[in-house]
Image (cartoon, helix red, strand yellow):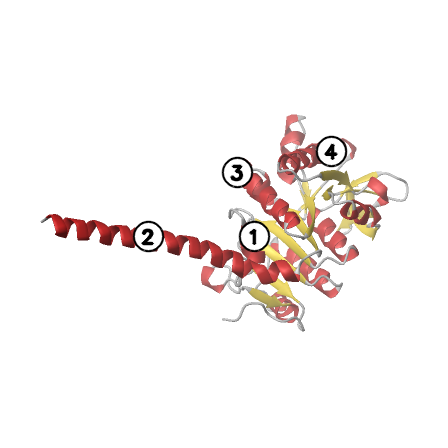
């Protein structure tokens, strides 16, 4: 019986060794799969619009910051543009005021603007802290710094919605200076008009305008949806890569609605103004940025110009 038992044990040891070797091989394959993307995007600018649940959940927040920091350390030049809508609403209610929205845009009177600027700067510095903790130098700025975001008053279907700004001009010099000095810029979307009054800016609009101005290679939106679906009711219709001509057709045919419509229009606008690729990702998935950028298929939707080569072929 003893030799049989010994053979059984050596067989189990051998199988365990094979499993361990396979595990290490799988890890190596992940790194090898990432290599061409690291080479392609070395020293290229990527703008990450950070918002949604990933800003509220502390664990997800850590994952996003880890992803962006890793992108920087492997040679990308990331810029974070963040929102803070849920946090602003919380503080507006704390002040005994009711958040008011017109056509999806926050109505911002003088008191609300004061709260919004305070909250966005608080969020901004909390993100700086998280990046610094990972050993990377970050600088938190608003669109007011260096006259980066110039705006005019935005109207919603002719309605005055207060201190909500439409970006008229981006001066990216401060961003170039920070990137050149090896800092990771973190931008909160506050701008000034010609009278130097402060305005709240939709963070998607700010990220898109900044990506255009710095000729970003990539723009990534972290959202609370998985990406663009041909049929939103059918999860199997998630589109991995979407040329802008097809994106326009989806809009024309009425497949795109709700909050995805302005987001997709922003994506198309960015591509038509020189951004190479725009990614719509589910920020609720841990490390979604790395999975999208460094794997062949990715996990969200990549929007690209019609002449761009697809990375992934089914």
Element at label 1:
helix
The circle drawn on residue 112 is: 4
Q: Of callouts 1 and 2, which one flags the residue occurring earlier in the amino acid sequence?
A: 2
Q: CA distance from mark 3 to mark 1?
A: 16 Å
Element at label 3:
helix
**Foreground of the two, 192 or 71:** 71
User: Which numbered mark, 1 or 4, is in the foreground of this view?
Assistant: 1
Q: What percent of the width, then of the height, locates residue 168?
A: 83, 52
Q: Of callouts 4 and 2, which one flags the residue occurring earlier in the amino acid sequence?
A: 2
In this figure, which residue is indicated by the disc labeled 1? 290
Furthest toward the right, the residue is: 195
Q: What percent of the width, then of the height, locates residue 300?
A: 55, 57
In this figure, which residue is indicated by the disc labeled 2? 17
**Foreground of the two, 102 or 282:** 282
Residue 93: image quadrant is: top right
Element at label 4:
helix
Do the residues bearing badges 3 and 1 touch, measured as CB atoms within 8 Å?
A: no
* Whether residue 283 is situated above or below residue 96 in the rendered picture: below
* Whether residue 84 is situated above or below residue 77 in the rendered picture: above
Q: Residue at x 86, y 44 (%)?
A: 147
User: Which numbered mark, 1 or 2, is in the foreground of this view?
Assistant: 2
The circle drawn on residue 59 is: 3
Answer with left or right where residue 203 lies relative to residue 229: right
Q: Of callouts 3 and 2, which one flags the residue occurring earlier in the amino acid sequence?
A: 2
Q: Of callouts 3 and 4, which one flags the residue occurring earlier in the amino acid sequence?
A: 3
**Foreground of the two, 85 or 174:** 174
Q: Is residue 173 visible?
A: yes
């Amino acid at each position: 019986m003893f030799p049989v038992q010994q053979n059984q044990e050596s067989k189990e040891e051998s199988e365990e060794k094979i499993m361990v070797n396979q595990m290490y091989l799988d890890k190596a394959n992940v790194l090898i799969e990432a290599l061409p993307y690291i080479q392609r995007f070395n020293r290229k600018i990527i703008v990450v619009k950070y918002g949604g649940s990933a800003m509220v959940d502390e664990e997800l927040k850590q994952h996003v910051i880890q992803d962006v920091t890793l992108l920087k350390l492997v040679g990308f030049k990331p810029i974070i543009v963040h929102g803070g809508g849920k946090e602003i609403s919380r503080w507006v209610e704390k002040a005994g005021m009711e958040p008011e929205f017109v056509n999806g845009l926050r109505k911002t009177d003088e008191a609300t603007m004061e709260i919004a600027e305070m909250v966005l700067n608080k969020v901004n510095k909390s993100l700086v802290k998280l990046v610094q903790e990972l050993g990377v130098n970050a600088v938190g700025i608003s669109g007011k710094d260096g006259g980066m975001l110039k705006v005019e008053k935005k109207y919603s279907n002719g309605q005055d919605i207060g201190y909500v700004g439409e970006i008229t001009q981006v001066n990216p010099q401060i961003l170039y200076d920070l990137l050149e000095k090896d800092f990771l810029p973190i931008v909160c979307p506050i701008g000034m008009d010609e009278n130097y009054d402060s305005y709240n800016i939709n963070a998607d609009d700010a990220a898109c305008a900044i990506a255009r101005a710095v000729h970003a290679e990539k723009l990534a939106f972290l959202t609370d949806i998985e990406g663009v679906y041909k049929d939103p009711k059918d999860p199997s219709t998630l589109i991995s890569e979407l040329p802008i001509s097809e994106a326009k057709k989806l809009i024309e045919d009425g497949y795109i609605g709700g909050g995805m419509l302005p987001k997709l229009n922003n994506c198309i606008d960015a591509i038509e103004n020189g951004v190479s690729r725009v990614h719509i990702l589910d920020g609720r998935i841990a490390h979604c940025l790395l999975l999208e950028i460094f794997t062949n298929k990715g996990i969200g939707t990549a929007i690209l110009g019609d002449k761009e080569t697809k990375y992934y072929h089914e």
